[in-house]
Amino acid sequence: MRSAAIIREARLRAGLTQAELAERTGRERSVIARWEQGVVAPSVDTLLTLIEACGFDLPLELIPSQPVDNERLRKNLLLSPERRVQRALRGREKASG
């Protein structure tokens, strides 16, 4: 999720206008608008400050990434979209088990 969407969602959930969020954070309303539009992105520290000003916490956690299986992706691209959906649904059924 992009920072623009996170800022907008936090602000709306808090029931704040852009002007109110700007006032709480000491920023200009136009800067809040630019961040929400994705014109520019705030630093991580600023993003966390904005989220806090909305009354939320955004925990950041490092998790190991899964390596991409390029061969499997290549084989899946050869399948029809319907077949790919069927395989995905079967995989979900097995996982929920």
Image: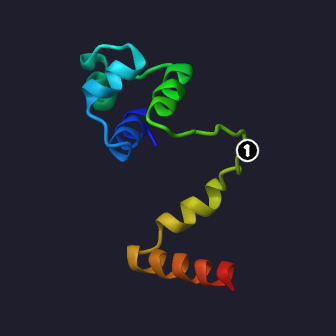
Q: Is residue 40 visible?
A: no
Q: Position of residue 79 (x, y in %)?
A: 46, 73
In the displayed structure, 25 sits above or below 59; it is above
Residue at figure coordinates x 33%, y 21% from the top left = 22
Kindly indicate the quadrant of the structure image that contains residue 12: top left
Quarter of the image with the C terminus is bottom right
User: What is the three-letter code of the residue carrying label 1?
Assistant: Ile
Residue at figure coordinates x 45%, y 27% from the top left = 50
Q: Position of residue 7 (x, y in %)?
A: 40, 35
Q: Is residue 36 left or right of residue 62?
A: left
Residue behind mark 1 = 63
Q: Is residue 67 visible?
A: yes
In the displayed structure, 2 sits above or below 73; it is above
Q: Position of residue 16 (x, y in %)?
A: 31, 36
Count how many numbered circles sit on residues in the image: 1
**SS class of the residue under badge 1?**
loop
Q: Nearer the viewer, residue 89 or 22?
A: 22
Q: Is residue 39 left or right of residue 57?
A: left
- The crowding category of the residue bearing disc 1, from other C-alpha atoms within 10 Å (few below 14, some 14 to 19, many at least 20), is few
Q: Is residue 79 left or right of residue 27?
A: right
Residue at figure coordinates x 71%, y 51% from the top left = 66
In the displayed structure, 64 sits above or below 18; it is below
Q: Nearer the viewer, residue 27 or 66?
A: 27
- Residue extending farthest to the right is 64
Q: Position of residue 4 (x, y in %)?
A: 37, 34
